[in-house]
Amino acid sequence: MKYLLPALALMALPLAVSWADPASDAASQLPAAPYLLPGAPTFDLTITQFRGKFDIDNPSLPLNEFRAVEKSRDKANLTRAATKINENLYASAALELGTLKIKSMQITWLPIQGPEQKAARGKALEYMAAIIRSFTPTLSKAQSQQKLTKLLSDGKNKRYFAQNDGAIRYVVADNGEKGLTFAVEPIKLTLSETLNSGE
């Protein structure tokens, strides 16, 4: 539990740049996380529904019950919830106020040093790939692992990297020794985007 608040701060830092230091160079600042913007879309799934389905689909990767996080700077726009998976791995979500539908689903890994690092990272990658499959069920386990490997490679050492894939945005926030956050978010498609992707 002592790592929960630092982990949540780490998850929110790269994705919510609206909190950035105003004295820093404007060119180095990132835009506000899309799920924080007014009218940001949600998945048609509450956090309770997600957890139930995730646990059934991934019996070796259990998620404990998500708890609301009270200390949130953006509580007027959304609710944040989190759960501890183990000492260095956390799941969190940004939820629509009232409905608790998911705006952003995030897994954060806090690297550990020593002989357990490889196994801990492997477990984190399993959870991240399972999150991909949860929102893109047509992908096999191998395909979701390949997609994750590519996303993490493209986002390596970047405070914020996003890639859109149809109606889903994948986000990587790689803060090196401080941690790695992987998120899945819905995208609001417009008619022209839909038509262009069909060509």
Image (cartoon, rainbow, N blue to C red):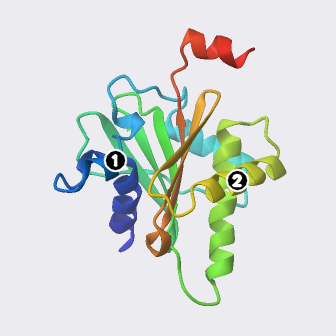
Q: Quadrant of residue 193?
A: top right
Q: Does the image show residue 91?
A: yes
Q: Nearer the viewer, mark 1 or mark 2?
A: 2
Callout 1: helix, strand or loop?
A: loop
* Residue 2 place in picture, x, y as percent: 35, 74
Residue under label 1: 16
Give the quadrant of the C terminus. Answer: top right
Q: Going 35% across and 41% down the picture, which residue do you hit?
A: 31
CA–CA distance in space, label 1 to label 2: 23 Å
Q: Nearer the viewer, residue 17 or 184?
A: 17
Residue 133 vs residue 51: left or right? right
- Identity, as a three-letter code, of the amino acid under mark 1: Ala
Residue positioned most to the left: 23
What residue is shown at x 55% (from left), y 26% (from top)? 44
Q: Which residue is denoted by mark 2 in the rendering?
A: 150
Q: Position of residue 70 (x, y in %)?
A: 26, 51
Q: Secondary structure at mark 2?
A: helix
